Amino acid sequence: MSGPRAVRVAYITDGNPVPPGTNERRGSPVSDADAAVRPGEPGRPEVARARRVVVKIGSSSLTTAAGGLDADRVDALVDVLVKQDGRQIVLVSSGAIAAGLAPLGLTRRPADLARQQAAASVGQGLLLARYTSSFARYGRRVGQVLLTSDDTSRRAHYRNAYRTLDQLFAMGVFPVVNENDTVATDEIRFGDNDRLAALVAHLVRADLLVLLSDVDGLYDGDPSRPGTRRIEEVAGPGDLAGVELGRPGRAGVGTGGMVTKVEAASIATGAGIPVVLAAASQAGDALSGARAGTFFRPTGRRSAGRLLWLAHASAPRGAVLLDAGAVRAITERGSSLLPAGITGVEGDFAAGEPIELRDEAGRAVARGLVNFDAKEIPRLIGRSTHELARELGPAYEREVVHRDDLVVMRA
Ligand SMILES: Nc1ncnc2c1ncn2[C@@H]1O[C@H](COP(=O)(O)OP(=O)(O)O)[C@@H](O)[C@H]1O
Ligand SMILES: N[C@@H](CCC(=O)OP(=O)(O)O)C(=O)O
């Protein structure tokens, strides 16, 4: 097969040139036995015990050097996924745009959104067809789930997405998730799927997120430079000080490079979910708890709810400005935002859309889904809800942003 060669790296390794015949970046190869957890060694027990797992694979790991989907690579991934007995797996797969290039006569990823969307529209069908036949080799079915970044911040959509995924698990179907590229605008778009995968991991309450790429882990600098070293474990943000996060690899079909992967790892670990970043050819080891790739330890507590989406996926359509009392009420007491604490409004948003809540210095202190249109806010400013209800009717006796729809941003 022309797919990726197995790369097994047990220790932090020096960077090497990319070997011929693969577009994976690798460290010094050692034997399978070295990468596997040896008796008496801790390995990564959190990984080995994980039951619900989100696996994300990037475009660069699914395409041939000449462009187009690489059936062997898809099969190699599926071979690993179907062997994860007792686990529920969501596959977040990029590759729609890459898969649509050749059929549309495009030789490279277009820069403009319209042609990217056209390519995604053609390619997403091909991508799913590829997964469908690959899983069918094992008598397994796949279900396509296309998500947009923005609307999953909304309660009903979030709940529906969760229910669909849960039902697919219950029916033994492998969900294959991608961004709904054809409807996403530049403003609300993820673009890369790394952050999407972290948020999906949170959505399904996964025990583990595995990011598979064309590089066998996080390096302390661009791995195409000799002398850079793979980092085996990241215990917290301090371990990333001095690490240079570079652009996508030479395949030219990936989007975010390491920046978006580390961002995704930080979202997931902040929500209590451990992350392994490894090469696609290491998927089996990465999922088994062997010390392949880079392991990111959880830094925060697990929590439920869609507020993580609101914080990391939504694109605010405007802002309201808060007086000091309202800032304290929201950031220290977890209160809802009432009209009395508002001093100004910016932008043109509609009720239900995400907005920023800013302090007197203009700093964003929170993000939330607003209950009023922007044009309604000026007449509410500084007034009590009772007063407003008396004057304008009971519909006005409500919070501008309810605390259940509000997330305080970290300083
Ligand atoms: N510090 C780093 N460690 C590892 N890889 C890096 C680093 N900086 C830049 N990269 C590049 O990021 C690439 C992976 O990103 P990308 O091409 O967007 O992958 P994907 O398509 O899998 O999402 C690697 O091929 C590598 O060349
Ligand atoms: N939704 C897009 C993802 C774009 C992309 O290239 O993402 P990635 O390879 O994960 O950096 C697609 O399917 O083409």
Image: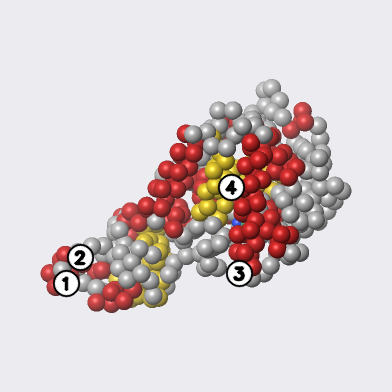
> Label 1: which residue?
392
Of the numbered discs 3 and 2, the one sitting upstream in the chain is 3
State the CA–CA distance, disc 4 to disc 2. Answer: 42 Å
The furthest residue to the right: 20
The quadrant where residue 377 appears: bottom left
Q: Quadrant of the N terminus?
A: top right
> Label 2: which residue?
395
With 49 as the anchor, is 231 left or right in this view?
Answer: right
Which residue is pictured at 57% across the width and 52% down the height?
178
- Residue 293 vertical placement versus 103 (above, below): above
Can residue 286 be seen here? The reply is: no
State the CA–CA distance, disc 1 to disc 4. Answer: 48 Å
Q: From the top left corner, tell me how far across and down residue 190 is, in percent.
A: 56, 60
Amino acid on which the number 4 mark rests in the picture: Val
State the CA–CA distance, disc 1 to disc 3. Answer: 45 Å
Q: Nearer the viewer, mark 1 or mark 3?
A: 3
Can residue 312 be seen here? The reply is: yes
The quadrant where residue 292 appears: top right
Of the numbered discs 4 and 2, the one sitting upstream in the chain is 4
Could you tell me which secondary element the residue under label 2 belongs to? helix
Amino acid on which the number 3 mark rests in the picture: Ala
